[in-house]
Amino acid sequence: MICPYRAARVVASDSTTMELQIQNLSKTYPNGVRALKDVTLTIPAGMYGLLGPNGAGKSTLMRILATLQEPDRGIVRLGDTDVLNQKDELRTMLGYLPQEFGVYPRVSAESLLDHFALLKGIAGRRARRQVVEALLRQTNLWEVRKQKLGGYSGGMRQRFGVAVALLGSPRLLIVDEPTAGLDPAERVRFLNLLSEIGENSVVLLSTHIVEDVSELCTRMAIIDQGEILLETEPLRAVDDLRGRIWRRVMSKDELPEVERNHAVISTKLLAGRTLVRIHGDAPPGPGFEPAEPDLEDVYFSAMAGHIGRRRGQPEPEAAP
């Protein structure tokens, strides 16, 4: 017998594909901070990455989409649902894993998930038991279901948060900075789980960790200071930078002059010296060699204004 949770996933995958459409979404806080500035995005089913530094506006956008905060203006639609004006309807299709969430440390994962399932409207004990088991197995927590949540590792708590967010088989799953603080093994397990979920839902992954987007997402947007700088496919964005990224290892004393004359997008220490990466259409000078681009180059180039767009303005030229 198929449990209600798995049956719901099958039905969802056979139904019309949903898109999340965001148009001209803006938010200014009472202190004058403009958190969002006319954000417009079309987010298809699957894994979608929202990449940006802390304070870029990611969490504000997530809270608005999760119906926890009101924008000043704008339109948001999930399929035929008006997200801003049909909040109750949207919440039946929504799963939300915030950056920080609390758990009852003295309660087992199985008991607390059963409680949340009851609050979600799954009244029948047998149906609820089937749903809880399916979710705990999917998040690889079944073997530790009797363990108190206070003894869970950070990654285990994150996976429990996903289990809660998946109650009701959401069509839209929002996860805000989900891998921050996880060790490498837990991070891999968590990202694999999100990838599975993205097969049947719109999954919006908000993060400042470039690798999370690179490994998971078929489309992405880069946001900074409330504005969308670039909206693209990660693989295509990386490919567009081929032949335009240059690298050189130099002494720290040489760096200021290079920064004055070239479009430096990133620097890092390497064996006591400085590895510099530059964006440009031609070799920046002696000692520079072409570098294989990656998504980190895309991110830093967009943040520096060398690629992408700001409100439809043309791409600025690199410094001579």
Image (cartoon, rainbow, N blue to C red):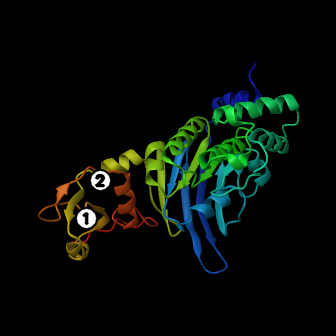
Label 2 element class: loop
Q: Residues within 10 Å of mark 1 (few under 14, many from 20)?
A: few
Location of residue 250 in the rendering, given as x and y in whole percent from the top left corner: 19, 66
Name the residue at 79% across, 44% down.
112
**Is 87 positioned to the left or the right of 158 in the image?**
right
Q: Residue tagged by mark 2?
A: 241
Residue sitting nearer the eye, 23 or 318 = 318
Alpha-carbon span between mark 1 and mark 2: 28 Å
Q: Residue tagged by mark 1?
A: 272
Identify the image quadrant of residue 142: top right
Outermost residue on the bottom side: it is: 31
**Is 260 positioned to the left or the right of 314 in the image?**
left
Residue sitting nearer the eye, 252 or 5 = 252
**In the image, is residue 17 above or below residue 262?**
above
Mark toward the viewer: 1 or 2: 1
Outermost residue on the right side: it is: 124
Location of residue 24 in the rendering, given as x and y in whole percent from the top left corner: 58, 63
Outermost residue on the left side: it is: 286
Label 1 or label 2, whichever comes before in sequence order: 2
Label 2 sits on what residue type? Leu
The number of numbered badges drawn on the structure is 2
Label 1 sits on what residue type? Gly
**Is 221 positioned to the left or the right of 126 in the image?**
left
Identify the image quadrant of residue 3: top right
